[in-house]
Amino acid sequence: MFSSANRRHSGPARKAWRAVLAGILGLAATPLAAADETGWRLQPDARIDLQTVSAQTTTRDEDLVIDGEALSVRGQIGVGLESKRTRVRLEADRIEVFRLGDGRRDVSRDRLTANVEHDLTSKLELQVQARRYDDLVTVESADTDGWEYSARATFEPSRENRFRVQGTWRERQYDNGAGPATRGDGARIDAQYRRRFGPYHYLAFDLRTETIRSDDPQRGYERDSAGVAYTRPVAKDLRVRPALELIRTRFDGRIADDGALRRDRQTVPEVELLWWPGKWRVEAEAKYVFFQSNESVREREGYRLTLSVGYVF
């Protein structure tokens, strides 16, 4: 699954990954041996999702219309170990995407995640996580392998108010086809405030800033985004979620028409319906993307419709 170059690149990452896994296994060993005394519970789970996507993009001059349809299958297995104040979880999932239409290549993605959450107090929760990706589509490349290490703090002073901040360090390797693989790394910081009005009734504000630095001039970038989402129950097991996201991206080594570095801006309104009857997960999303850039051939707009049906075991 991993190339030899990737193994060399992620030597320190692998050591950190082994340390995380060893810590998880060490934390799990005692509760499993004395579950009755400690109150730990082992909770395996699985999920499968089928998804269909239909999208259409039109260039600024409306002289090119790009249609895209795809079907995907996602399988996930996980195991959780929980006590009153601590939750440990290992999770693996794979996505197979079948792109419809001539000349469109199918893709897949693998992901392995380990995380530990601990309630320091009744109002403050900490989480640490390690995650491994294979063949991930990212901002800077369509074929990326990588490691992510993150720490998150959640502060909930009352049932109505929740504050969350997370820092993530990312190490990436890019498949450049016939050329040699290149690498990049950088940090991402996320912040969120969520206001709760009732069961499944929220208003959330999100901010994110991220950077990838690379010796490959085509890979480095900076990105800032801000979003707001409102989730409201409309019937039993049915919720509606309108949202709006603004994204600005600055590339380190991509030159636009005017000779300056490329700058992109996206405005993305969307609405999502979530119907979760029992163990079924039915989700429908309609999204419209307004894409502006100082590289004129990149300017476009279009819609993306997604329907996903999943089942949790």
Image (cartoon, rainbow, N blue to C red):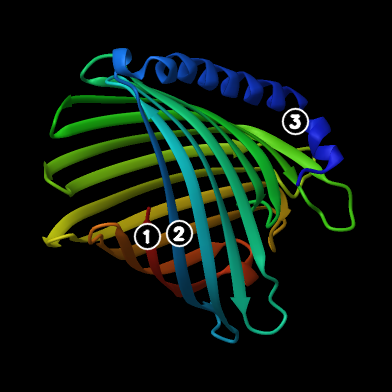
Per the model, the C-alpha gap separating discs 1 and 2 is 6 Å
Tell me: residue 133, above or below residue 47: above
How many residues crowd mark 3 within 10 Å: few (<14), some (14–19), many (20+)? Answer: some
Residue kind at label 1, given as amino acid type: Tyr
Q: Is residue 222 visible?
A: yes
Front-most of residues 18 and 36: 36
Residue at 68% x, 76% y is 104
Q: Earlier in the sequence, mark 2 or mark 3?
A: 3
Front-most of residues 190 and 259: 190
- Circle 1/circle 2 CB separation < 8 Å: yes
Residue at 47% x, 73% y is 52
Q: At which x and y percent is residue 136? A: 63, 51
Q: At which x and y percent is residue 100? A: 60, 80
Residue kind at label 2, given as amino acid type: Ile
Q: Which residue is mark 3?
A: 10
Please state if 205 lies on the left or on the right of 92 as rendered: left
Q: Which element carries disc 3, helix, strand or loop?
A: loop
Please state if 207 lies on the left or on the right of 91 as rendered: left
Tell me: residue 23, above or below residue 241: above
Front-most of residues 250 and 258: 250
- Residue 48 bears which disc, if any? 2
Q: Residue furthest bottom?
A: 63
